[in-house]
Amino acid sequence: MKTHTFKALLLTICFGILAAASAFAQDAPPADVTCFESRKGASEVVKHDLKPGWPNVKCSPKTGAVLWWGDPFDGTVPMGDMPLLDKVPKGNAVVKPRSEHLPLLAMCGTACHNGKVPPLPLPTTKKPHPIPTMEGLLPDAKNLQHGRARLWCLNCHDVKQRNKLVDNFDDPISIDQPQLLCGKCHGDKLRDWRDGIHGKRIGEWASTGKKRWFTCTECHNPHNVQDGERNRGFIQIEPESPPQLTKGMKDAKHELMPPIAH
Ligand code: HEC
Ligand code: HEC
Ligand code: HEC
């Protein structure tokens, strides 16, 4: 009888501890996992569940890069008009906005450059000149690492609307759609990108299916393309380990089959 009571007591205590532990585990929020999609430091996503057990991304524990997307269109917006892209039905080309990664952008056209500050007239030349206020925000401003000293802020940023970029006709373009900015000088790359031989797309397989196009600035930092240390995010010295085997599969020996004659 005594041992019974003791056992029951022990069990109750154990269950109590277990229940408390699981309640604690449920209460404690899981630590945020952040990984990068393309350019390290400028394309980070926080891992979360799109639906229970279905994450938005899977991250590489080795490099911190995204290995897999749960929904390739998560957080995307339609791509701006692109010349000669008429084969792709409208809405099937989407991009991820850059704005969310640009902490200063909200201020550029409001607190600063709002038409009153700095005082008018607006600059009339695109020649490089010292701008001490910007040097704190853009460390390379004195020696801009793009275009071998032939480029300046206003080749890319709209003179009147500083939170916009500028195309080849001096029309403002959204900072979320930099392709026509870069394309005005790198026409060959714009064509390659349009034709799918530069950059990256994810989404549906068919060539005219819905796809997320990675925009130029998701991979290139426009302020430092000349800098040798740029794009560290691309550098990968070792391959990833092989993916997990499909459920029920013991090994991947079938892949060693002799090639099919043709
Ligand atoms: C080659 C084109 C180009 C040139 C030249 C250029 N920029 Fe930019 N700038 C951009 C683009 C494109 C973005 C958006 C970057 C992104 O999406 O990551 C940007 C973003 C910015 C931002 C916002 C950054 C943030 O983190 O919110 C500032 C500020 C800025 N540029 C200042 C300057 C200044 C000052 C100069 C001149 C010294 C300059 N830029 C020259 C293309 C350029
Ligand atoms: C106003 C013209 C102009 C614009 C706009 C422009 N670039 Fe450039 N870019 C240049 C020039 C000039 C060079 C230097 C070419 C050289 O040295 O041969 C260059 C070089 C580059 C390089 C190669 C860097 C190197 O030296 O290896 C990359 C990458 C690049 N640009 C990306 C971009 C991206 C991305 C954008 C849009 C955000 C952009 N450029 C917008 C003119 C431009
Ligand atoms: C998915 C990432 C990615 C996207 C998107 C991307 N690029 Fe690149 N690009 C690269 C890589 C990687 C290289 C080669 C490494 C380097 O020099 O930075 C490169 C090289 C370049 C070069 C230098 C080529 C040379 O001959 O030296 C230019 C210019 C350039 N890209 C422009 C663009 C423009 C313009 C766009 C958008 C229309 C774009 N890129 C979109 C990844 C990308």
Image: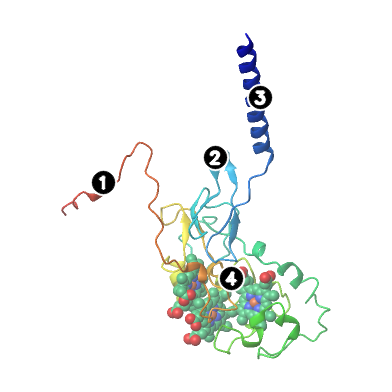
The amino acid beneath tag 1 is Lys
Label 3 belongs to which residue? Answer: 13
Q: CA distance from mark 4 to mark 1?
A: 46 Å
| Residue identified by numbered label 2 | 53
Element class at badge 2: loop
Is residue 262 depicted above or below 118 in this figure? above
Residue 260, image x, y percentages: 18, 51
Say which quadrant the C terminus sits in: bottom left
Say which amino acid is labelled 4.
Answer: Pro
Residue under pointer 1? 253
Question: Which residue position holds label 4?
Answer: 178
Give the SS element for disc 1.
Answer: helix
If the image is split into quadrants, where does the N terminus sit? top right
**For the residue carrying disc 4, how many other residues have a C-alpha within 10 Å: few (<14), some (14-19), or many (20+)?**
many
Residue most extreme to the top: 1
Indicate which disc, 1 or 3, sits on the residue closer to the N terminus: 3
Q: Which one is earlier in the sequence, the residue at label 1 or at label 2?
A: 2
- Sequence-wise, the earlier of marks 3 and 2 is 3
User: Gap between marks 4 and 2, in whole Å?
Assistant: 35 Å
Judging depth in this view, the residue of 134 and 11 nearest the camera is 11
Q: Earlier in the sequence, mark 4 or mark 2?
A: 2
How far from the left and from the top, in percent, is residue 101?
A: 65, 64
Q: Amino acid at mark 3?
A: Ile
Q: How far apart, in angstroms, are the residues tagged by discs 1 and 3?
A: 50 Å
Q: Which mark is in front, 4 or 3? A: 3
In the image, residue 142 sits, relative to residue 184, either above or below, namely below
